[in-house]
Image (cartoon, grey):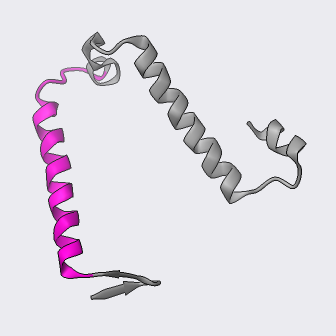
């Protein structure tokens, strides 16, 4: 077992991680054949409604803000509101 600052990974953990990466890369390899242009990739061939895409973007922005606030916590409520 390897020790990464308190995180211990056994060989079975590496096996699971390897299988996961192979699975994800396989999906990418298969889907790559269906994507012809960057517009197809970004807009999913216009098959995804705008509200779903907008919701996904808002979720990413929310996660980035959460990480930013966690890494640099505000000293007061007014400062927290101004960072969003």
Q: Is residue 39 above or below residue 16?
A: above
In the displayed structure image, the side of residue 43 where residue 80 appears, left or right:
right
Tell me, yes or no, whether the highlighted magenta stretch contains residue 80: no
The residue at the point 33 percent across, 18 percent down is 43
Residue 3, horizontal then vertical, whole percent: 37, 87
Residue 82, horizontal then vertical, whole percent: 83, 37
Q: Is residue 65 above or below residue 67?
A: above
Q: For the stretch drawn in magenta, what is the main secondary structure?
A: helix
In the displayed structure image, the side of residue 43 where residue 74 appears, left or right:
right
Q: Is residue 51 above or below residue 75?
A: above
In the displayed structure image, the side of residue 73 where residue 16 appears, left or right:
left
Q: Give the magenta part as a residue range.
A: 10-38
The residue at the point 18 percent across, 21 percent down is 36
Q: In terms of depth relative to the viewer, which is nearer, 22 or 10?
A: 10
Residue 41, horizontal then vertical, whole percent: 28, 24
Q: Quadrant of the N terminus?
A: bottom left
Tell me, yes or no, whether the highlighted magenta stretch contains residue 20: yes
Image quadrant assignment for residue 81: top right
Q: Is residue 25 above or below residue 17?
A: above
């Amino acid at each position: 077992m390897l020790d990464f600052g308190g995180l211990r990974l056994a060989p079975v953990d590496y096996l699971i991680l390897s299988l996961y990466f192979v699975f994800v890369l396989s999906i990418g390899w298969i889907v790559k054949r269906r994507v012809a242009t960057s517009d197809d990739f970004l807009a999913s061939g216009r098959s995804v409604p705008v509200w779903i895409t907008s919701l996904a973007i808002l979720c990413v922005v929310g996660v980035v803000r959460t990480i930013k606030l966690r890494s640099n916590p505000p000293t007061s409520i007014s400062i927290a509101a101004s960072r969003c």
